[in-house]
Image: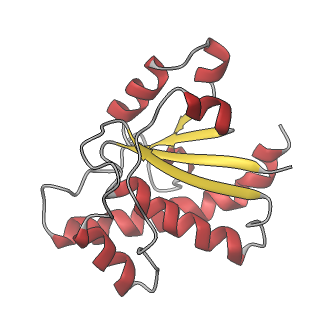
């Protein structure tokens, strides 16, 4: 049985696609890639069909990841039926996704991505680097890598629920 994880941000060109690429790599390294599928989307539709932001792609490439396959998609209510776990990048994305939940039960599929970050403290937002400089993308990648390590470690338990 395949467990499906979806990552959601605003435009699906920075944070969620970076997390998508990193999570797929970590799943392969953990031997879970045959049991877990990953998708990403944005709550807005401005960038549908576009590749990842060039700064996000460059940051991933410099760290040894392949960002070339990504094309932006938009979150819709269909994602509830298609995925087991919906991880949002910030509180605004969380509110948008939960507001679209067809049922209360489906709203329980939504969690903040950084709930799995051991260094998050009370702040579960992944900051949006879009309007900043290159250093913001590097900071986001470090946050994503750290969070993804813990997420992959906890996925077997999540999959058993």
The answer to which of 15 and 114 lies nearer the viewer is: 15
The answer to which of 85 and 124 lies nearer the viewer is: 85
Q: Position of residue 154 (x, y in %)?
A: 72, 53
Q: Position of residue 72 (x, y in %)?
A: 38, 53
Residue in the image at 46% along x and 70% along y: 69
Furthest toward the top, the residue is: 103
Q: Quadrant of the C terminus?
A: top right
Q: Position of residue 122 (x, y in %)?
A: 41, 39
Q: Position of residue 94 (x, y in %)?
A: 42, 31
Q: Is residue 11 left or right of residue 133?
A: right
Question: Tag count in the figure?
Answer: 0
Q: Tell me if residue 94 comes above or below residue 64 in the rendering.
A: above
Furthest toward the front, the residue is: 49
* Colouring rule applied to residues: secondary structure
Q: Quadrant of residue 30?
A: bottom right
Q: Tell me if residue 11 comes above or below residue 22 in the rendering.
A: above
Residue in the image at 41% along x and 64% along y: 18
Q: Tell me if residue 36 comes above or below residue 7 in the rendering.
A: below
Residue in the image at 80% along x and 54% along y: 156
Q: Tell me if residue 60 comes above or below residue 80 in the rendering.
A: below
Q: Is residue 151 left or right of residue 98?
A: right
- Does residue 114 appear in this view? no
The answer to which of 71 and 130 lies nearer the viewer is: 71
Residue in the image at 36% along x and 56% along y: 15
- Does residue 12 appear in this view? yes
């Amino acid at each position: 049985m395949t467990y499906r994880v979806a990552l959601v941000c605003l435009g699906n060109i920075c944070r969620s696609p970076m997390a998508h690429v990193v999570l797929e790599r970590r799943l392969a390294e953990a031997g879970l890639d045959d049991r877990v599928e990953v998708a990403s989307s944005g709550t807005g539709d401005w960038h549908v069909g576009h590749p990842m932001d060039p700064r996000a792609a460059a940051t991933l490439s410099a760290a040894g990841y392949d960002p070339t396959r990504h094309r932006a998609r938009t979150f819709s209510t269909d994602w509830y039926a298609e995925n087991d776990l919906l991880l949002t990048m910030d509180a605004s994305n969380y509110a948008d996704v939960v507001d679209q939940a067809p049922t209360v039960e489906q709203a329980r599929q939504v969690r903040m991505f950084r709930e799995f970050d051991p260094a998050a403290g009370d702040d579960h937002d992944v900051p949006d680097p879009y309007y900043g400089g290159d250093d913001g993308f590097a900071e986001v990648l470090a946050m994503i890598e750290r969070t993804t390590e813990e997420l992959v470690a906890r996925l077997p338990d999540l999959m058993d629920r």
